Image (spheres, rainbow, N blue to C red):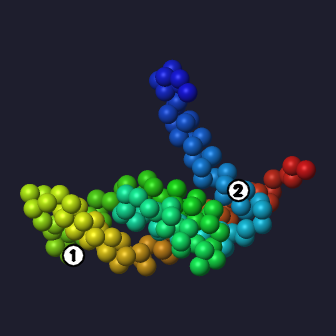
Amino acid sequence: MSIANESEPGGAVHRWRGWLRRRLLDPLVKLLGDGLAPGPAARALAVGALLGVMPLPWGTGLLCLVVALPLRLNPLAVQVGNYAAWPLQLFLAWPYLRLGSAWFGPAPPIAAGLLGTLAKAGGAALCTWALTAPLLLPLLYAASLRLAAALGSRLAQAPADH
């Protein structure tokens, strides 16, 4: 990648689309092509996305693996859902912090200790996520099912490469 590409009109958009295709769509199409049905793929994507929007700055990838195995979900599809959700995680971080503060009380001032302030605010945001997760999961599943069905039908219409 050169700086000239970034300054060209659409250069950043082209890189963004390439990243989305490489990290999200290509693995999902491969899973569907390898025989993963749209229903199980959608469940795995939805669980991965739900864990991906958790207001944690670290650990969602490992958490996805820990959750996928006992639920017998495809771990790769769960990770694809997790990666797909990171923009949503950034978007929802502030509302989770604000809602957590409203529901569980404000964090102590930073003068009382930075670590304690961050722990209380993060804990309240995490509790808020846990309370809203049952509402968010059906929405994520519906979106994932629609995506998996669309990719599955496109894959079925495509001619075989062999």
Residue 115 position, x and y percent, is 21, 60
The residue lying toward the viewer, choosing from 131 and 117, is 117
Q: Which residue was labeled with disc 1?
A: 103
Give the class, few, some or many, for how many residues have Cα within 10 Å of label 1's Cα (few <14, many ≥20): few
Vertical order, 18 against 134 (above or below): above
Residue 159 position, x and y percent, is 85, 52
Give the class, few, some or many, for how many residues have Cα within 10 Å of label 2's Cα (few <14, many ≥20): some
Residue 139 position, x and y percent, is 49, 71
Which sits earlier in the primary sequence, circle 1 or circle 2? 2
Task: Tell me: 91 left or right of 115.
Answer: right
Question: Element at badge 2?
Answer: helix
Specify the quadrant of the image occupied by residue 71.
bottom right
Query: Of the numbered discs in the image, which one, if any, rests on residue 29?
Result: 2
Residue depicted at 52% across the width and 37% down the height: 13
> Which amino acid type is shown beneath numbered disc 1?
Trp
Residue depicted at 62% across the width and 66% down the height: 75
Location of the N terminus (image quadrant)? top right
Specify the quadrant of the image occupied by residue 94.
bottom left
